[in-house]
């Protein structure tokens, strides 16, 4: 009886929300609730057009929004030039509901187990005039909704070409949004914060027109993951999951009606997708909550991906690495070996006759320095960029045969350095910049991976700078997305982990292929050397870019004033302690220790936190969060009882009150707090910090102040077991740091 009353209450609330927007139940309508009954979905058909509605509690999230696909009249389609659309003329012929509940263990991640619990509605639709069937499958979770189109194999639908997918997301208001300009080729833009209605007026100035590859499509087009907040306090996020053999989805806004519509990335011909049944689209995802922390702790996108396809995952491991990188990004050293060759032809150009430029970073001597540093400080790997021939003319020429990925420069002894590293307990990390010539990379892929296997490399950083070759294609098209997946699958055969830069933004595929250890796919730390990113950049990325998977953000720049060691006059837009916090707030199993060894020696006491903090976790608890303002998270080490807490904020600073209720009552913890000094500021006094040591226990409270652009980092080492010790400990309640 109690359960019946609860269901009636929820049904009434949902009907009220529907009534507010003029929705009445029809014969072909179907309703579905999340397991906790907070999220409500309504599917319907109006004049043959499928649509859906979503509410959270009694608040409308997505107004009635239509679904369908526009197909191209193409000679490659089963109906050729007589092709018709999958937009209207549908009747409901079947609907099935089910419940699913499992707990699975990721190979690595923010937590050691993830619950996948949802209610499902699968509606089978028939288009009478074409005799075609289409299934729309909805999964409703406690924190949102995922849905996709499915196309069974059938007589009248075998091959078809997508001109556009017309999936609508009708917003319930002119929400505040954190958005990036929609672009077929880059995500390396500065996040904008505005009302939806303001996107059009701000769009042009929001585009980084000087980026290596830019292809915007509309002055109201935005990228996913799109984070929004309604006036009445709902947090809403739109993205996609499991994008395989399909183009990346953007959103195009009708800013008069506040309706987003999917906008797929085209190929060189202008068409969007080539499909063969049976097939399906990626999941379209909608996260919703009245608590911002739920946006960060959601596993909905991972859950919508297929389970791991790699049978033996023992070789996949979180990795912390240093690299010959930052000195080149800042401009002190170079990737290229010589300045004498304006044009390089691999196999013909003789580097042994070239004069070294004296600035080449990937020399045997320089790499040895990084290997020694890694070994001394317990860091797993050393990335080396610029080790291979071809960097003299690698960019800006649309060059196909740009690298061979196997031939080192004369001053890089690959055999010696790998032996030296292994003797020190360190591995080298491979670097494969493709210059976006995907076809060249594929023709060399097997030889490149064999070379890695020969020398014991188990991880590669790939790069896709510039315009895609084959020419005219885009970074996020169906064919290029297939290239990225091909690299991941081939790497798995060779037991190689992949960290792709400038590639497509992730959609949770790291569940299926956990050797996808990290990606870039957003504006990273390198931009701090190019003029800087706003202090709020790193407290919006977890709400947007990181929804689909971890990012190789390359944190750890402790010498924030670059002019202290180079001619670069730029500075990093965080405090020193704010850089420490990123190892927690910007979750990734792949963490770079990005600064120079000599700079870590200058701040050795602060560097201790970077050495200590793990990359793999058993539990993660988001303590406080607000998009673009602040994030505080506590994480428990996967291999011990230790905890680590990180807090990061924007240019306004933030005061945090941390209740340590999540600690184990049977342990006392050695607590080390790395905090901004009282006079710290990311602009004028970024390197002012203090380190405090305390003992704490479950229930204690810490009060910390983050400076403008700052943060804090805390290590909590479990030391003493037994409640009797806790009773003897002096309370630390309400202690300010």
Image (spheres, rainbow, N blue to C red):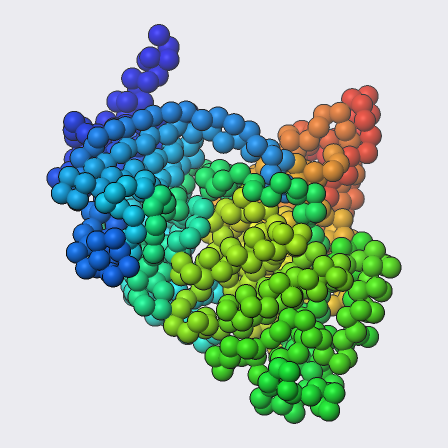
**Image position, residue 661 (x, y; %):** 64, 30
Image quadrant occupied by the N terminus: top left
**Image position, residue 182 (x, y; %):** 37, 62
Residue name at image x 28 percent, y 41 percent: 154
Residue name at image x 42 percent, y 74 percent: 471
Q: Is residue 79 visible?
A: yes
**Image position, residue 361 (x, y; %):** 72, 76
Q: Residue furthest front?
A: 155
Q: Which residue is at the front of the view, 66 or 286?
A: 66
Residue name at image x 59 percent, y 46 percent: 514
- Residue 449 relative to residue 74: left or right: right
Q: Is residue 344 above or below residue 688?
A: below
Q: Which residue is at the front of the view, 202 or 63?
A: 63
- Residue 18 relative to residue 119: left or right: left
Residue name at image x 83 percent, y 59 percent: 422
Q: Residue furthest right?
A: 423
State the image quarter where residue 146 is shown.
top left
Q: Which residue is at the front of the view, 565 or 697?
A: 565
Q: Is residue 57 visible?
A: no
Q: Is residue 632 above or below residue 254?
A: above
Numbered-mark total: 0
Q: Which residue is at the front of the view, 604 or 655?
A: 604
**Image position, residue 50 (x, y; %):** 22, 40
- Residue 392 relative to residue 8: left or right: right
């Amino acid at each position: 009886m109690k359960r019946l009353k609860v269901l009636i209450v929820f049904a009434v609330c949902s009907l009220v929300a529907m009534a507010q927007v003029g929705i009445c139940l029809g014969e072909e309508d179907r309703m579905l609730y999340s397991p906790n009954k907070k999220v409500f979905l309504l599917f319907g058909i109006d004049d043959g057009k499928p649509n859906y509605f979503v509410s959270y509690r009694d608040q409308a999230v997505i107004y009635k929004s239509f679904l369908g696909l526009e197909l191209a009249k193409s000679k490659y389609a089963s109906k050729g030039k007589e092709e018709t659309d999958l937009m209207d003329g549908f009747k409901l012929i079947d609907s099935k509901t089910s419940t699913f509940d499992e707990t699975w263990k990721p190979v690595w991640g923010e937590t050691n187990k993830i619950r996948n619990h949802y209610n499902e509605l699968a509606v089978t639709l028939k288009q009478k005039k074409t005799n075609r069937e289409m299934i729309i499958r909805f999964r409703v979770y406690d924190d949102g909704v995922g849905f996709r189109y499915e196309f069974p194999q059938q007589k009248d639908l075998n091959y078809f070409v997508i001109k556009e997918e017309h999936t609508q997301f009708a917003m319930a208001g002119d929400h505040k949004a954190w958005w990036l300009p929609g672009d077929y080729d880059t995500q390396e833009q500065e996040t904008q914060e505005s009302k939806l209605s303001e996107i059009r007026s701000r769009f042009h100035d929001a585009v980084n027109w000087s980026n290596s590859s830019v292809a915007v499509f509309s002055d109201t087009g935005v990228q996913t993951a799109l984070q929004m907040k309604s006036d009445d306090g709902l947090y809403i996020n739109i993205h996609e999951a499991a994008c395989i053999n399909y183009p990346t989805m953007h959103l195009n806004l009708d800013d008069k009606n506040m309706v987003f519509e999917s906008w797929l990335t085209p190929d060189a011909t202008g068409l969007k997708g080539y499909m063969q049944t049976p097939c399906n689209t990626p999941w379209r995802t909608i996260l919703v909550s009245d608590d911002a922390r739920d946006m960060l702790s959601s596993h909905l996108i991972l859950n919508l991906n297929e389970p791991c396809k790699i049978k033996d995952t023992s070789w996949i491991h979180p990795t912390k690495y240093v690299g010959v990188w930052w000195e080149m990004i800042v401009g002190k050293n170079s990737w290229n070996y010589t300045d004498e060759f304006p044009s390089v032809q691999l196999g013909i150009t003789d580097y042994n006759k070239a004069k070294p430029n004296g600035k080449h970073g990937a020399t045997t001597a320089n790499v040895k320095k990084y290997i020694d540093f890694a070994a001394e400080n317990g860091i797993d790997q050393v990335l080396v960029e610029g080790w291979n021939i071809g960097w003299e003319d690698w960019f800006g020429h649309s060059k196909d045969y740009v690298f061979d990925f196997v031939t080192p420069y004369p001053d890089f002894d690959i055999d010696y350095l790998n032996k030296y590293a292994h003797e020190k307990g360190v591995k080298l990390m491979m670097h494969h910049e493709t210059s976006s010539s995907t076809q060249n990379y594929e023709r060399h892929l097997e030889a490149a991976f064999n070379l890695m296997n020969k020398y014991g490399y188990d991880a590669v950083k790939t790069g896709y700078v510039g315009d895609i070759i084959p020419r005219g294609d885009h970074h996020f098209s169906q064919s290029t997305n297939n290239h990225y997946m091909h690299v991941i699958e081939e790497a798995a055969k060779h037991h190689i982990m992949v960290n792709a830069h400038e590639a497509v933004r992730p959609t949770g595929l790291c569940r299926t292929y956990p050797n996808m250890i990290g990606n870039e796919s957003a504006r990273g730390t390198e931009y701090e050397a190019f003029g800087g990113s706003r202090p709020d950049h790193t407290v919006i990325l977890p709400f947007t870019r990181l929804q689909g998977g971890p990012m190789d953000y390359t944190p750890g720049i402790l010498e924030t004033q670059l002019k202290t060691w180079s001619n670069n006059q730029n500075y990093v837009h965080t405090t020193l302690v704010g850089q420490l916090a990123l190892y927690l707030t910007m979750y990734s199993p792949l963490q770079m220790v990005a600064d120079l060894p000599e700079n870590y020696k200058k701040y050795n006491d602060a560097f201790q936190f970077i050495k200590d903090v793990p990359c793999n976790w058993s539990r993660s608890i988001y303590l406080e969060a607000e998009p673009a303002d602040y994030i505080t998270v506590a994480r428990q080490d996967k291999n011990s009882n230790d905890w680590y807490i990180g807090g990061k904020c924007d240019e306004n600073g933030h005061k945090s009150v941390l209740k340590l209720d999540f600690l184990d009552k049977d342990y006392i913890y050695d607590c080390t707090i790395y905090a901004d000094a009282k006079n710290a500021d990311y602009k004028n006094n970024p390197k002012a910090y203090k380190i405090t040591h305390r003992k704490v226990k479950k229930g204690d409270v810490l009060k910390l102040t983050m400076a403008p652009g700052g943060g804090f980092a805390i290590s909590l080492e479990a030391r003493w077991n037994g409640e009797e010790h806790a009773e003897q400990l002096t309370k630390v309640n309400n202690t300010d740091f």
